[in-house]
Each structure stands twice: as structure tokens, then as C-alpha cells.
Image (cartoon, rainbow, N blue to C red):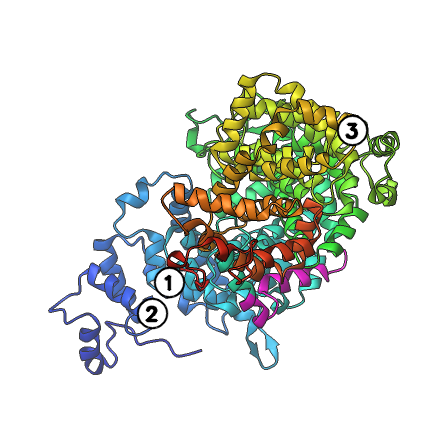
Amino acid sequence: MAAAPAAVGSGASRGRRAAGTVAAWGGWGGRPRPANILLQLRQGQLTGRGLVRAVQFTETFLTERDKQSKWSGIPQLLLKLYATSHLHSDFVECQNILKEISPLLSMEAMAFVTEERKLTQETTYPNTYIFDLFGGVDLLVEILMRPTISIRGQKLKISDEMSKDCLSILYNTCVCTEGVTKRLAEKNDFVIFLFTLMTSKKTFLQTATLIEDILGVKKEMIRLDEVPNLSSLVSNFDQQQLANFCRILAVTISEMDTGNDDKHTLLAKNAQQKKNLSLGPSAAEINQAALLSIPGFVERLCKLATRKVSESTGTASFLQELEEWYTWLDNALVLDALMRVANEESEHSQASIVFPPPGASEENGLPHTSTRTQLPQSMKIMHEIMYKLEVLYVLCVLLMGRQRNQVHRMIAEFKLIPGLNNLFDKLIWRKHSASALVLHGHNQNCDCSPVSKDITLKIQFLRLLQSFSDHHENKYLLLNNQELNELSAISLKANIPEVEAVLNTDRSLVCDGKRGLLTRLLQVMKKEPAESSFRFWQARAVESFLRGTTSYADQMFLLKRGLLEHILYCIVDSECKSRDVLQSYFDLLGELMKFNVDAFKRFNKYINTDAKFQVFLKQINSSLVDSNMLVRCVTLSLDRFENQVDMKVAEVLSECRLLAYISQVPTQMSFLFRLINIIHVQTLTQENVSCLNTSLVILMLARRKERLPLYLRLLQRMEHSKKYPGFLLNNFHNLLRFWQQHYLHKDKDSTCLENSSCISFSYWKETVSILLNPDRQSPSALVSYIEEPYMDIDRDFTEE
């Protein structure tokens, strides 16, 4: 370790340092003002030169300045801490000093996190700021990392209690002082070292929370394969520790910029994917692989996710965890109260902790105790919700990663889906009590409130179901044995082959009980209030069950449960205004009705008046980005029905308002014109690229009927009528060029297009090639319909 900088104000070598000291202080003509000292310390902190630590001052000097500046004695304590934390120290005195510093900082942190900022507003230089400015953060990092130093072959050791104090102080400083967390994040060796402190239960929670904050601001993702003995570390966690560790994993296995966000342009995503191919697997992918290589890791996550509240840690243990969080802020009174109640309950007392409602008076900020209340059970439930939220997120990310099939297999084997089904009513979608538990100093809208956690758990649960069902045969695990038999009966009655995936489903892994998970989801979906934010996620989860190759049996299973009528009620009768919910409902309706005559009969029975039909059309036409998947599905269905010879189909074709509307060429041309006009290469995203594919479906079906030149000619006329000759067709030409670049190198996307449309991908490619034919004599080439003065088809695809 480098020698300490000489102390300002000491008698030794005063003359030799005089000029340097004056320069460091900016040439003060007498005593330096406190503000000047702090400014110079801040500059030293940024540059690493000049004044950087309390050890550069004498204790007398600091004490004198403290009287004027009200630094709470923190610089003097840091001076003592430095003196008592050298390599050969026994650290006893060092720990005593840490316990003096800790409450000075924790009071500010308590005020900060409870939004009671009066203290920090009235203090000119808050304690945490002074602590950091005089080198406290760097000193604590050095103290914590002493065990990495060997002296004569033996590594130094510090106690868990001392590590705990250091971690608490560091966390409080990060909470209150801007920039500290980012500086710690830049110390990669320190971040890796922190993982080793999680081997001790005494320091686990403090370490995990500090790591989570640091990783949240770290520019580059940490690699878990660099953590010493990662497999052993994780394997030795108890279930409670593993659940908390998932908060860290959430940061380490999620792409920092996933590129899957609907708002990212496909141009940007494609460019990033090309870059990633040259760089190899990302840190997130490496971290996912590292976790999956740990024996029993996924199995333990599944057990955590499906653990019943009655099987969870007892109330006393939960209170002990709350004690850790309150110790974090060093409120000894709260700690004493929590432990008193916990001890009483462990001795079979009926005492319970009660947090007062917002606005209620509370002496000393303490929770009160009372007897025979329901709060301990509420706290158990909240405990489980917080754990399951993190665990489900990790499982969801792994399900969407490169090892998806491996994760799918393990999740099925460890019965995650039946376990979640058993928890559905009692925990995941339980009925709310009259008054939700809200911790003192918080409100139900903040991220840490029980209400917020409860909402987030539901959304994460629905996202997991969506990822689990999407284009995977394991989706039938969402049903129970009776419901699987119902699917078989539907196929038998319709005289169609039974779905192979249903036949291959392992009946020992499906849901048990009277209803499967999918049926339970449908029940709560139909009861959801009109304004509920859950509607979007519920519809997405159910739609994922239908995605892929269209299954008549799957559609009928849902139709028999009134899903189509519920969707139409929400779109037409409630006149839903949310664009996100409308899009999810249109997408679901399209998958539910596609190629299904019975679904169109049900649609016509519900939309039985012109007034209702006009409301429905108004919703469709209000945003084609949201409704185009339904337009595509109805267009595909119409094409199939027109080529079938069947009395039932003929009846539907003659009676259904929607099919009659879509069958009109002017309607198709109106959709086609608007679909092409609302997208451009530079604005294509995962959300709106469906508009391009829907326009292609319309033209492919026209090509089948040898009407492609007619449709292109009509587009040209529509261009001229809008006074923008060439604008639309040039844009479409560029979109199709991008389509070739985007889809011809992505097997998954091409398979999805083929399965969802029942049109071979080779026909998609042929149609695009015909449209892009450069021969102006070709009647099916776009260039034949763009007049020479308006030709603009060779734009470079660059992100602007």
C-alpha cells in the first residue's frame, strides 16, 4: 500500500510543503474557507491529485474547521479509521469507529428513502457527502478487500460484523451521494470480490443489495464466469438467499440493450446482430450458460416459484429479514421492536407487528404491537410475492435465451406449470384484502409497495406463460387431463387428425385439479375490469397458446369458453380506448378466428346489427398498426373458404358481414394503400413490420388469382389521386428490398410467416422477387408502375 500523504498543518517539513499546500488551496491568503477545502477535495477526487483524503489534514485542523462547518466529526473519524485499519491492525478499534460513523450516515439514508428530505435540505454538507469527499468510500473498499492481501503466505481476515458495517455505510453513501455507485461500478475487481462476501449469511443481504445497485449503473455487464467458485457459491445458498440472488441475476442475464423492444428499429437491430455475430456470445448469454451449468439451479428456482405460503419461512424468520433491512438504515428502535415481537412469536405468543396506515401518528416511528391480528400472514404473502417476482423473471429470461429448449425441458420436468396452477387462486390472483399492507413512509404507488409488487407479480406471471406457450408443444401442459381429453374429442368429432403434440404430452406433467392454468386465466380475464392494465398481458398469454400452426381443436377449446364473445364485448360494447389492449385483442381475435368457420358464425351472431358492425370497423380503421393482424387472418380465411365446397362454409360466406366487407376489392385496396403508407424502412419495428407482411399477404393472394397487375395498377391510380405519384410504390419497393435482407437470413421469422399464413415461404420469396423485378416490361413488377421522373428505388438502408 502506498504511503499516506503528509498531513496538512503538522510541524514536520512545514516549510517544504508550504508552497504546495498554498497551490492546492488555490492561493488562500490566510485560513482556507471550508467551501474552498471541499472544492479542492472534490477536484482531487476527480483528478486523483492534490487533496483526496482526511489523512492529509491534522486532527486539530479538522476539529477547528468542524466547529464552523458542522461536519459532524466525520473527517476526524476517518482520520482515526485510517490509523487503525493498517495491515497489522487487529481491527477492534477500527470496528468501533465504524459503529460511530454508521448512524451519522444512516439517518440521512432513512430520510432519503422515505422522502423526508428536510435533514438533507437544511444541512449545507450532508454527512454522506462529507464522508465520501474525505476519502471514506475508497478507504472502506480497501478495508473490505484486505482478505485478498497475503502476508507471508497467509491471507488477512476481517470479521463478518465489520464487513457488515462497511457494506451498510457504503450502501447508505450510494443512496444519498450522486456518483458513488458509478465509481464503485468502475472497480471491476471490487465488484467481483463482493460476490465472495455472499458466502456468509451475516453479510449476504447487505452484499446482495449493494451489488444490485452497482450492477444497475455499470456500463459493461459483469461476467459470472469470472466469479470465483460460482457453482459452489450458488449451490450453498439456502432458498431465501437464492431468491434474493435472483435480483442480481435479473441484471446479469438480461441484455443491456435487448433489441427486442418494439420501439427499436429493425435496421438498428439487424446492425447490432451483425456486430454481435462478429463479437461472439454476449455477456448475458455467457451468464445464462454459466447458471444453467450449475447442478440443480433450475430445479431450485422451480421449487421457489411453486412453494406455497404455508411452506415458506416462518414469520419469525421473515421478521429477521425485515430486521436486516431496518438495520440497513440503522434504526435501532425499530430493530428492537421487530426482534422483540419475533422472539415473542417464536415462544408461541400471539403478538404481531402492525404498521400504521399512512397519516397515522406513530411514536418514534416505531411499528406498534398488538395481539391476534392478521398481519403476520399478510407479511408471509408479501414475502412470497417479492421472492416469486424475481424468480419468475429469471425463468422467463432463460426461456427466451439461446438454451430455450433445454430450459423448457427442465421446467416441464420440475413441474413448474402444475405448481403455478396450484398457487393461482391463493397467491398469484388472490382476492385483495380490504386494505393492502403499506409500510410506513411509503404509499401504494411506489415501486416497493405491496400493491405495486402484487401487480408486477401478475404481469411477470403472464409474461412467463406467454414465453412458455409461444411456438412450443409444451404449451399443452397448461391443461389438465380432462381438458386434454376434450381436445381429443373435438378432433374426433370434426373428423380431423388429433394434434401430434397433444398425443405426445406427458400426462404426469400436466396441471391437476378441476381446471388447468389456461382455463383459470380465461376465467379471470373475463372478469377483469374494462380499464385494467392486465388485459393486455392476459390477451398476449392466451394468444401465445394459439400461435404457430393453426389448430382447430385449440380454437374450439377456447371458443366453447366464450372467449370470442368476451373479446367482441371489449372491442365493441365497452369501446376500449387503450391502443395496447386493442392491439392484443385484435391479434388474439385473428388467431382465434383464422380458418375457423364456427368462429365466423359466432362473430356474425354477436355482431348482429349494422350499428355494431360499424363500431367494430371504426375500431379496426382507427389504427391499422394495431388491427392489421386481424385483417390478415380474415383475408387468409376468406381465400380458403372461397376454395372450399361445403354448405356450412357457403352459409357463412353469404351471411358474415366481415367476410363480405373484406371480399370487396376497394376494401382490400384501401387497406393495402394505408398499410404501405404508414411504414418506411427507417421506421420499421417489430411492432409495425406486420403491416408490411399483411400487405404482402394481400398481394400474394391476388397473385394466386392472377390479379397482381390489377392491384398494382389500382395502387398507381390511388397515388395519382392523392397527388403523390411514385411516393407509395417507391416506398414499397424499398420496403421489399429490406424484407429480403431481413427475412432471408432469419430461419425463425420465415418459419413463423409460413406457419401463420399456411403459405409456403418459397411463395413469399417468389412474390417479392417478382415485385422487385427490374424489367419495366413485366406487368407484375413495381417499376412498371413508377413513372421515370418519379423513380427513387435505390436508397441506401442506413439508420438516420
Disc 3 element: loop
Depth check, front residue: 393 or 114: 393
User: What crowding class fits label 2: few (fewer than 14 Cα within 10 Å), some (14-19), or many (20 or more)?
Assistant: many
Badge 1 or badge 2: first in the primary sequence: 2
- Give the residue pinned by disc 1: 78
Q: Residue at x 50, y 56 (%)?
A: 784
- Percent x, y for residue 531? 52, 26
Earlier-in-chain disc, 2 versus 3? 2
Q: Is residue 101 left or right of residue 562?
A: left
Q: CA distance from mark 1 to mark 2?
A: 8 Å
> In the picture shown, does residue 499 fall above or below 44?
above
Q: Nearer the viewer, mark 2 or mark 3?
A: 3
Which SS class for mark 1?
helix
- Alpha-carbon neighbours of circle 1 within 10 Å: few (<14), some, or many (≥20)? many
Residue that numbered label 2 is attached to: 55
Looking at the image, do the residues carrying marks 1 and 2 touch, with CB atoms under 8 Å apart?
yes
Q: Of discs 3 and 1, which sits in the foreground?
A: 3
Task: Tell me the magenta residue range.
Answer: 274-296
Amino acid bearing label 3? Arg
The overriding secondary structure of the stretch rendered in magenta is: helix
Residue on which the image places disc 3: 515
- Mark 2: amino acid: Val
581 relative position to 470: left or right? left
Residue 276 belongs to the span the image colors magenta: yes
Task: Give the residue type that dot 1 points to.
Answer: Leu
